[in-house]
Image (spheres, rainbow, N blue to C red):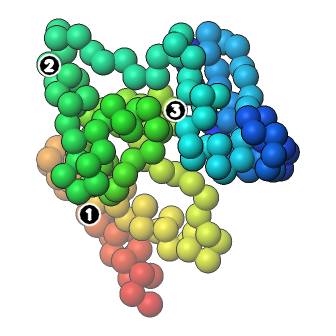
Amino acid sequence: MTGFTFTHTTMDCESCHQRPATLRRTEVVDNKMTTVHLCDECAKTGDVSLKPPPSAALVVVPTNTDQELRELFERRCPVCGLSYSEFRTRGRLGCGNDYTLFRKGLVPLLEKIHGKTRHEGKVPTHAGHDLAREKKIQRLKDELQKVVKREAYEEAAKIRDQLRELEGEKKS
């Protein structure tokens, strides 16, 4: 497994030993974790200690057998100029357009990292009730469509009544 993360820290720079480190780079290569503390200057200049070792292949360019992935790695954003390969190396997108442009590569990556592709974070207390009602309304609308397709009209009438009640709460 290969990967790295950046975190803020308050130590001396391990590269120049002159300024306080403001960045901690933790890297995992072949299941071995190493940490380097750097100042802003050394981090910006691309000090040799920032470069991953040769065994840490951060970008794997696909072979000709998968034409779509090969094209994804060659694609470049017309807005910010970022390529998918650069995103994989840096770990950051350049602009909002990149989410759409690199979708094919991002979806599996997000599923691998987060287990989901949809954000389901905490809901503010003041918005919780409204959001729960909106989700229930959407669920009932979806259910209503399924029930109508099955021609189960009595069940559809019950769902319709529930929807009217919830939508009435929404208006008041």
Which amino acid type is shown beneath numbered disc 2? Gln
Determine contact: label 1, label 3, CB under 8 Å: no
The residues tagged by marks 3 and 2 sit, at their Cα atoms, a distance apart of: 24 Å
Q: Is residue 114 above or below residue 142?
A: above
Q: Amino acid at mark 3?
A: Ile
The image's mark for residue 171 is none
In this rendering, is residue 26 above or below 65?
below
Labels 3 & 2 near each other (Cβ < 8 A): no
Q: Is residue 142 something that shows in the picture?
A: no
State the quadrant of the C terminus.
bottom left
* Label placed on residue 67: 2
Whichever of callouts 1 and 2 sits on the residue coming sooner in the sequence is 2
Expressed as whole percent of the image width and height from the top left, the position of residue 52 reads 56, 23
Image depth: mark 1 or mark 2 in front = 2
In percent of width and height, residue 66 lies at 19, 15
The residue that mark 1 highlights is: 157
Read off the residue under disc 3: 113
In the picture provided, is 34 more to the left or to the right than 92? right
In depth, the one of 11 and 118 nearer the eye is 11
Q: Dot 3 lies on which element? A: helix
Vertically, is 122 above or below 100? below
Nearer the observer: mark 3 or 2; the answer is: 2
| Image coords of residue 103 (percent x, y) | 28, 40
- Sequence-first disc among 1 and 3: 3
Q: Mark 1: which amino acid? A: Ala
Q: Residues within 10 Å of mark 3 (few under 14, many from 20)?
A: few
Element marked by disc 1: helix
Residue at the (42%, 81%) spot, across then down? 170
Q: Are marks 1 and 2 in contact (CB under 8 Å)?
A: no
